[in-house]
Image: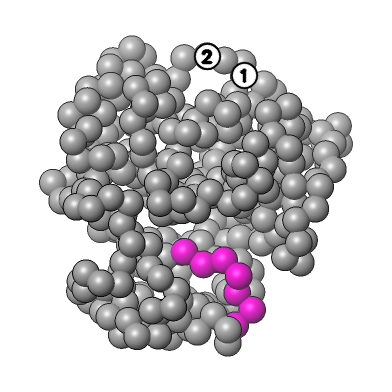
Amino acid sequence: MELHILEHSLKVASIEKEGIQICTHGLIKLAFLASKTRCKFFSLTETPEDYTIIVDEEGFKELPQSEHISVADATWVALNVVSGGSNTSTSQPIGVTKIAKSVIAPLADHNISVFMLSTYQTDFILVRERDLPMVMHTLSSEFTLFRVVNGETVAAHNLGVTNGFVKPKLGKMPRPIIHPLSSPSNMFCVTSLDPDTLPSVATLLMDVMFYSGGFPNNVLFTSASGELWKMVRIGGQPLGFDECGIVAQISEPLATADIPAYYISTFKFDHALVPEENIQSVIGALRTESAAQ
């Protein structure tokens, strides 16, 4: 398999709910008028606490300076696993469980924290830019490494890990779940929007983003007819960005049980989406891991 290192330098930020009004113009521009900006990577996730935005440095310039916006200290780089020489854009998601043992676990073993963003088509693994040499060194035996430069995919050369501090390898070790888990009652539908329909549904999407509206049935792709997902929320208090292994704690038991999952990290908490029919077995498996600590 191939591991692509995307060329974007990313910021991860939190927008407080009461501050969303002052950011609305910039967010609409980033989401619907990308051709009017130099932004190439943009993600917005709403949770009960806040909005988490992941955006490249050019896109970040579209947001105002505000006390309602908190920005993580580090600059992040996105990694993307590609199977069979092409991006994984089939109708079935890869899911974080498919890369749990090949990517997530080895990085946890080397004390490298990750920030996950699963989408309908693929999974992005965000790592701190300063950790990239160690990431490449860790994953080079499992993957062919490529970098995306000016839109072109070229072979990546190992950056070396001898300069400066090298994170110690922790080795394969038990990863008991140490953070509280909860599962809200609401259901989720994982969808993908046909880009050609974007102009015709822009108003509708704004309603969904800012006013909790709904989608019509004829503009979305879903991975299976009527498929619903349940959420497992990880964390009782904000998790921060420094702790290593949180994604591995959740994804490895799910991979062992062969349960697909989307994984979405946000500024304060982590979230795993699993098929609705699997939720009881998922909670059971994760609580077993938690009890093993």
On residue 239, the disc is none
Q: Label 1 to label 2, Cα distance in Å?
A: 8 Å
- Residue 261 picture quarter: top left
> Quick one: SS at disc 2?
loop
Mark 2 surroundings: few (<14), some (14-19) or many (≥20) residues within 10 A:
few
- Residue 39 picture quarter: bottom right
- The answer to whether 188 is drawn above or below residue 37 in the figure is above
- Residue 45 picture quarter: bottom left
User: Would you say residue 263 is visible in this rendering?
Assistant: no
Query: Residue under circle 1?
Result: 170
Residue at (70% x, 59% y) in the render:
7
Query: Residue under circle 2?
Result: 173
Q: Main secondary structure of the magenta part?
A: loop
The location of residue 76, given as percent across then percent down, is: 62, 53
The location of residue 56, given as percent across then percent down, is: 60, 66
Q: Marks 1 and 2: CB-CB under 8 Å?
A: yes
